[in-house]
Image (cartoon, rainbow, N blue to C red):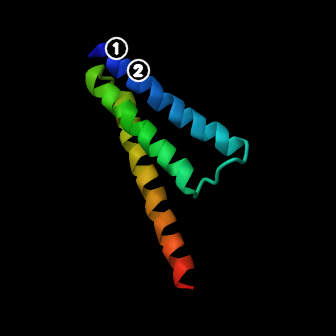
Amino acid sequence: MDLLADIIGMAGTSLVVGAFFLLQLNKVSPKGLMYNLMNLIGALFLLFSLCINFNLASFVIEVFWIAASVIGLVQYRKNKNALQAA
């Protein structure tokens, strides 16, 4: 189970870091769907990994990362609906 948690955790790290690199390269928008989904899924993968190999500081930051990603997705949805209504 430790190996699986490490693999999932590394996938999560790749998603979060990949999203940041794409943002820096202007390939994604910080308010876009792809950026926020990559961050959310990455943070969830990391949180799963942390449930197996617990680290409080990392656990707390992932909870906040998930919250920020959910806020970004809610804002994306609101903006998309507002544009469709216009």
Relative to 79, 59 lies left or right:
left
Crowd rating for badge 2 (residues with CA inside 10 Å; few <14, some 14–19, many 20+): some
Residue 54 or residue 84, whichever sits in front: 84
Amino acid residing under circle 2:
Ile
Q: Examine the rendered structure and indicate whether residue 81 appears above or below residue 35.
A: below
Residue 64 placement: quadrant: top left
Identify the residue under disc 2: 7
* The disc label shown at residue 54, or none: none
Q: Examine the rendered structure and indicate whether residue 13 appears above or below residue 6.
A: below
Amino acid residing under circle 1:
Leu
Q: Secondary structure at mark 1?
A: helix
Residue 74 placement: quadrant: bottom left
Q: Quadrant of the C terminus?
A: bottom right
Q: How many marks?
A: 2
- Image location (x, y in percent) of residue 78: 47, 71
Q: Examine the rendered structure and indicate whether residue 54 appears above or below residue 12.
A: above
Name, please, the residue furthest toward the bottom. Answer: 86
Identify the residue under disc 1: 3
- Image location (x, y in percent) of residue 73: 46, 58
Q: Quadrant of the N terminus?
A: top left
Residue 56 or residue 74, whichever sits in front: 74
Crowd rating for badge 1 (residues with CA inside 10 Å; few <14, some 14–19, many 20+): few
Q: Which residue is painted at 57% across and 33% down in the image?
A: 17
Q: Secondary structure at mark 2?
A: helix
Q: Mark 1 and mark 2 in contact (Cβ < 8 Å)?
A: yes
Name, please, the residue furthest toward the top. Answer: 3
Q: Which residue is painted at 48% across and 65% down in the image?
A: 75
Q: Which residue is painted at 66% across and 45% down in the image?
A: 23
Q: Examine the rendered structure and indicate whether residue 53 appears above or below residue 64.
A: above
Q: Using the numbered discs, state the Cα–Cα distance from disc 2 to disc 1 in whole angstroms.
A: 6 Å
Q: Which residue is painted at 52% across and 84% down in the image?
A: 85
